[in-house]
Amino acid sequence: SLAEAVRWYERAAEQDQSDALLALGRIYEKGLRGKADPDSALRFYRRALQAGKAEAGAGVSRLSRRPGASTVLDVLPPQ
């Protein structure tokens, strides 16, 4: 079931597993668990990108253009 898959993705995401982070981004963006949650999707896409999943960049780009979306500087660690 989708609910069980999400639980496994969430466990893997806790370990910064890039495939799981990307999958959760897609699940939240498309609203597969109910109502779409673009803010959560963007957070998962950004984490996936930081974990080395280049294809997550498309989700970051798409969702970052929304009015009121946080900037990439909001999630980057300080240098």
Image (cartoon, rainbow, N blue to C red):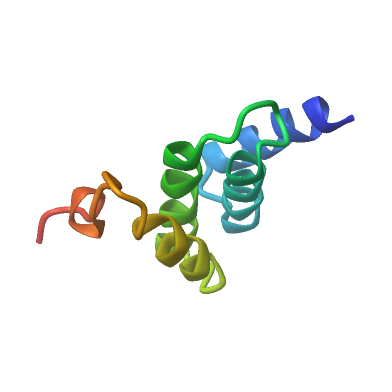
Residue drawn at 25 percent across, 47 percent down: 70
Extreme right residue here?
1
Vertical side of 15 occupied by 76: above or below: below
Q: Position of residue 65 (x, y in %)?
A: 35, 60
Q: Position of residue 6 (x, y in %)?
A: 72, 33
Vertical side of 9 occupied by 23: above or below: below
Residue drawn at 63 percent across, 33 percent down: 11
| Quarter where residue 7 is shown | top right
Q: Position of residue 57 (x, y in %)?
A: 46, 69
Residue drawn at 30 percent across, 47 percent down: 69
Vertical side of 47 occupied by 39: above or below: above
Vertical side of 24 occupied by 77: above or below: below
Q: Quadrant of the N terminus?
A: top right
Q: Is residue 43 left or right of residue 30?
A: left
Give the camera-side residue of 74 and 14: 74
Q: Position of residue 46 (x, y in %)?
A: 41, 55
Q: Quadrant of the C terminus?
A: bottom left
| Quarter where residue 35 is shown | top right
Q: Is residue 6 left or right of residue 47?
A: right
Residue drawn at 36 percent across, 52 percent down: 66
Extreme bottom residue here?
54
The mark tally for this picture is 0
Extreme front residue here?
67
